[in-house]
Image (cartoon, helix red, strand yellow):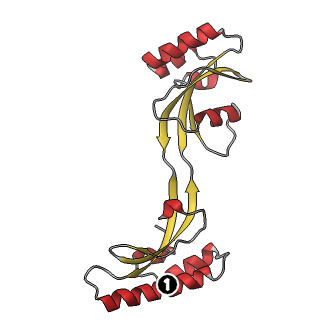
Amino acid sequence: AASKLKENEISNLVKSAEGWHIIKLTDRQPPQVKVCHILLKKEASKKRAREIYKRALAESFATLAKEVSEDENSRIQGGKLGFVFPKSTHRFGDIIRKKSEGLKEGEVLKPFKSEHGVHILKAIEVRPERLRVSHILIKAPKGSSKAEIKEAKKKAKKILDELKSDPKTSSSRFIRMAKKYSEDPSKDRGGDL
């Protein structure tokens, strides 16, 4: 349910084996890609770039970067540039960030040019999108009577209506209500999971 929410949006009631949940997506971190590269001088021929690209597909990228990369800073570390974060500018400019988006782990990009030279980029690790979620739980566990389930839903609906009565429900208001009403141990953290 949380993956479909926008940041700071509150869900409708969500039923689970434990009871009724009110879920709030507090933060969405897009995927992050850890990359390494080989940088060739701007004057590098297309033929040379293609040859190195073919080697990068067959050999150890780190060893090859140490051997041929013109980037003095990353060459000694096998071309490692670290994680590229969406919405941030990389030291090689936006082109590294843009080219990194959507890469799969182990994928090597064909040579491309930037103002710094010709790059061959490899994704060495991909962190998936991460969601930070808070919730309020009103318990109605398995084995509860129909009346108990109905009462738990009624209580959860009342809390949800109160939260949604103000379209700009602040995080602090959600936290206060989680601490007050939630029947989950996460209530001590304001419902933060």
What residue lies at 60% left-to-right and 7% top-to-bottom?
A: 47
Percent coordinates x, y for residue 140 in the rendering: 34, 82
The quarter of the picture where residue 40 lies is top right
What residue lies at 51% left-to-right and 79% top-to-bottom?
A: 178
Residue that label 1 marks: 157
Percent coordinates x, y for residue 187 in the rendering: 46, 77
What residue lies at 56% left-to-right and 84% top-to-bottom?
A: 161
Instruction: Give the amino acid type for the residue marked by disc 1 in the picture.
Output: Lys
In screen coordinates, is 16 left or right of 10? Answer: left
The quarter of the picture where residue 37 lies is top right
Give the camera-side residue of 31 and 71. Answer: 31
Task: Please tell me how many numbered marks the rendered image carries.
Answer: 1
The quarter of the picture where residue 73 lies is top right
Other residues around mark 1 within 10 Å, as few (<14) / some (14–19) / many (≥20): some
What residue lies at 54% left-to-right and 13% top-to-bottom?
A: 52
In screen coordinates, is 19 left or right of 87? Answer: left
Label 1 residue SS: helix
Percent coordinates x, y for residue 24 in the rendering: 54, 69
Q: Is residue 76 visible?
A: yes
Above-or-below relation of 11 to 176: above
Considering every residue shown, the one lying at the far right of the view is: 115
Considering every residue shown, the one lying at the far left of the view is: 143
Q: Is residue 91 visible?
A: no
Percent coordinates x, y for residue 165 in the rendering: 63, 83
Above-or-below relation of 111 to 90: above
Above-or-below relation of 166 to 9: below
Above-or-below relation of 33 to 115: below
Give the camera-side residue of 122 and 83. Answer: 122
